[in-house]
Image (cartoon, grey):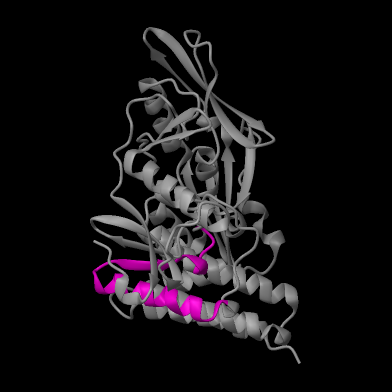
Amino acid sequence: MAEDPRALSEVRRQLIAEFVALPGEGDVILWQRALAEALVNAELNHEHHEKVLIKHHRHLLRIIGDALVYELLPSHTIRTLGKGPRAAPPGIASQGADFDFVFECAERLRAQGIVPIIADLTTLINTGDVIGWNGSGIVALECKNRPVPERLATSGRLARQRARGEAAEAYLRSSVLEEEGIVRQAVDFDIPDPAWVDLEGAILEADQSQAGFAVRELGKGDVVLVCTARMASVEDLGPAIPDTRDYGTPMMVNLRESLYSSDFRVQPPTAYPLTADYRHRLLEGQILIYRFVDVELLGASFIHDGIRTILSPRFTDDGLYVDVVSPTHRDSASFGPPLTRYALMMPVRLSQMRDAMTAYASRAMIADIEDSTSGPGVAPGDQFTYATAYRPAETLGIR
């Protein structure tokens, strides 16, 4: 007989509550052990639940694990460490002693004042088994539960794994990467933060409202609608849905989509700086957040070197782009995904995103804001180290 799905929801609620209490209460390694145990239980006891339900549960557990990644790592580091193949989430139970060694390495890092993140407990990390962070730098550690080999592999999976890690180290240290003859540089871009205070206020208002929903305007043509499980009927939303007839390009976004399309910029609700209760209810779909926006708000114009330059939004099969059009530049330039996904999928004011794009475009005309080879200057490099730990654990030493 299948167990009540509410039991799985309670597991997730407890993990979120314990995470939000860190670091004041609890321990980050013990918390990750509890997360790993929940994943193992899901893998081994799947016969008690429907296959689709347990698969969804495992995914949501890793979305909870992602919150630690967003809490500690810069977005460009997450992006770099997320590159590489991962066809399906790795099984935990089948790793046995190898996974035990991963936690041994994490313990040793923690003893050196480095906060560890177990990569297999997240959806975001594809490079390294443990990612360690402290105020002075980041380390990506491969954990091999065997003695140091006499010689390193020059081909096969291990060689490709090492090459990927070394490339990540080179890029994050220098902010410059050369791939297939193309030089890519990381550049500084002042991205506005989401309007967390407004979002939390809207959730609180919806919670206290007899109708069970609340509307918050982030700006003209930029509206957030929060719905709670207390809402009697979807039909009651009629008066709350904004009139978009005056919008140039109206768009509605359900922020819950981030549970299945999060990336190094777009965070799921488990990472929102909200209470544990709000995070859990957002994860479970007991609170829903919709955005109604006029995409034309991302359009703008400014004078650059005496010539008017225009920012013009457009949609393609790949998503939203904001073109930078200037008669003095023959090459096309644009802001594209994932930057524009952040503008739509996070509760950030579109007016602030427009101003940030305008400020950047006025300093430099670029071909691709995410992977520019030009611009106002290369971003500072990180103190980043890629290393491998072998048995015995005493050989591990990260400085």
Viewer-side residue, 38 vs 319: 38
Q: Looking at the rendering, in which quadrant would you find the N terminus?
A: bottom right
Q: What residue lies at 67% left-to-right and 32% top-to-bottom?
A: 316
Please count the marks in the image. 0
Image coords of residue 103 (percent x, y): 41, 76
106 inside magenta stretch: yes
**Residue extent of the magenta highlight:** 95-124
| 387 over 313 or under it: above or below | below
In this orientation, does residue 312 appear?
yes
Give the image quarter of residue 313. top right
Image coords of residue 213 (percent x, y): 57, 62
59 inside magenta stretch: no
| 125 over 62 or under it: above or below | above
Q: Is residue 188 left or right of residue 329?
A: left
| 247 over 389 or under it: above or below | above
Q: Residue furthest bottom?
A: 1
The majority secondary structure of the magenta stretch comes to helix
Image coords of residue 239 (percent x, y): 64, 52
Q: Looking at the rendering, in which quadrant would you find the C terminus?
A: bottom left
In this orientation, does residue 35 appear?
no
| 225 over 360 or under it: above or below | below
Viewer-side residue, 330 vs 241: 330
Give the image quarter of residue 318. top right
Viewer-side residue, 208 vs 168: 168
Image coords of residue 12 (percent x, y): 53, 77
